[in-house]
Image: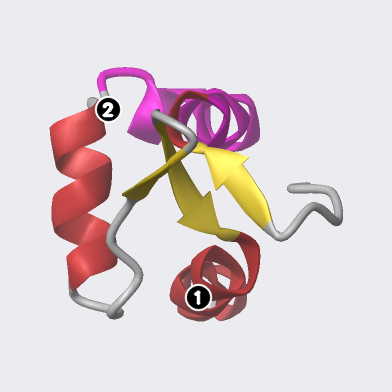
Amino acid sequence: MLGTTPRIRTQKVLQLLTERNACFYREGTNSDLKEFLEGFDAAPHKTDGVMVVDHQKILDALAPLDTA
């Protein structure tokens, strides 16, 4: 779902999550994503002036949702 790059732009993460489950993620915001990811020590951060999320950290945060 997320490709193989080490970091993913937060906007792209929101887009991919919406594609995955539009009913649940459609209304998601950057703030919602940040709040969710902070619980997994995966908060978005700036790289070259762009907000990104570490690829592996987002996979780890989403893993429990994949098994639910």
Rendered position, 57 above or below 22: below
Residue 50 % position (x, y)? 43, 29
Of the image marks 2 and 1, the number of the one nearer the N terminus = 2
Q: Residues within 10 Å of mark 1 (few under 14, many from 20)?
A: few
Q: Where residue 1 sits in the image (x, y, percent)?
A: 78, 47
In the image, the segment drawn in magenta is 12-27
Helix, strand or loop at mark 2? loop
Q: How crowded is mark 2: few (under 14 residues within 10 Å), some or many (20 or more)?
A: some
Q: Which of 36 and 57 is in front in this view?
A: 57
Report the amino acid beneath label 2: Gly
Q: What residue type is labelled 1?
A: Ala
Vertical side of 28 occupied by 32: above or below: below
The residue identified by callout 1 is 68
Residue at (74, 48) in percent of width and height:
2
Q: Residue at x 59, y 79 (%)?
A: 67
Name the residue tied to disc 2.
Answer: 28
Q: Please give the name of the residue rendered at 22% of the width and 59% of the height, measured from the top-left corner.
A: 36
Is residue 26 toward the left or the right of residue 33 in the image? right
Secondary element under disc 1, as helix, strand or loop, is: loop
Identified at 63% across, 73% down, the residue is 56
Select label 2 or label 1 by which is in front: 2
> Mark number for residue 59?
none
